[in-house]
Amino acid sequence: MDIHSLQTRLRAFSAERGWEPYQNPKNLAMAMVVEAAELVEIFQWLRPEQAADIAADAARQQHVGEEIADVLVYLLQIADRCGIDVEAAVERKIGLNALKYPVPTSPQPAPTDSGVADDPSPEPRAD
């Protein structure tokens, strides 16, 4: 995926429709959150095993793909408007997360029958 090329295409798409005045970082971020909520809505009442098997339902898989694309499009537009090099930002963040969450040196607790470890560690976050 060529991120720069996608951003160029998205910029042209917006320009052809006269949308630039409305596509500032604030508005784009709000629109992205709406699209993310639409993605979450697909999974809202599914059991974990149903959510994990989303590819078994072609229509639902397509819907998930469309919502993921919407979120990504807005995210790329935000980055473009803010002058963020997405690839460099992701690489930097992966490095920071590796420092923040090093690979454990001791064995992790085994999951119980419920699928949860007896002594769970805090979930790592991509923050």
Image: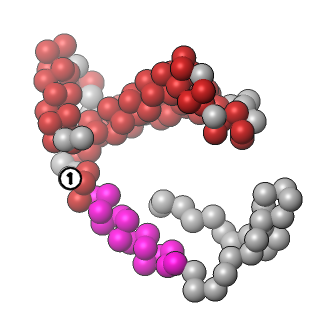
On the question of residue 27 being in view, the answer is yes
The color scheme shown is secondary structure
Task: Spot the residue most to the bottom.
Answer: 105
Where residue 109 sits, quadrant-wise, is bottom right
Task: Spot the residue most to the right.
Answer: 113
Magenta highlight: main SS: helix
On the question of residue 34 being in view, the answer is no
Task: Spot the residue most to the top.
Answer: 17
In screen coordinates, is 64 left or right of 32?
Answer: right
In screen coordinates, is 17 left or right of 94?
Answer: left
Q: Is residue 115 above or below residue 62?
A: below
Q: In the image, residue 38 lies at what x, y percent?
A: 54, 26
What secondary structure is marked by label 1?
Answer: loop
Q: In the image, residue 68 lies at what x, y percent?
A: 44, 32
Q: Residue at x 78, y 61 (%)?
A: 116
Q: Residue at x 60, y 31 (%)?
A: 54
Where residue 117 sits, quadrant-wise, is bottom right
Say which of 66 and 24 sits in front: 66
Which residue is labeled 1 in the image? 85
In screen coordinates, is 25 left or right of 85?
Answer: right
Magenta stretch? Answer: 89-103
- Disc 1 residue type (three-letter): Asp
Q: In the image, residue 110 lies at what x, y percent?
A: 76, 71
In reply to whether residue 49 is colored magenta, the answer given is no
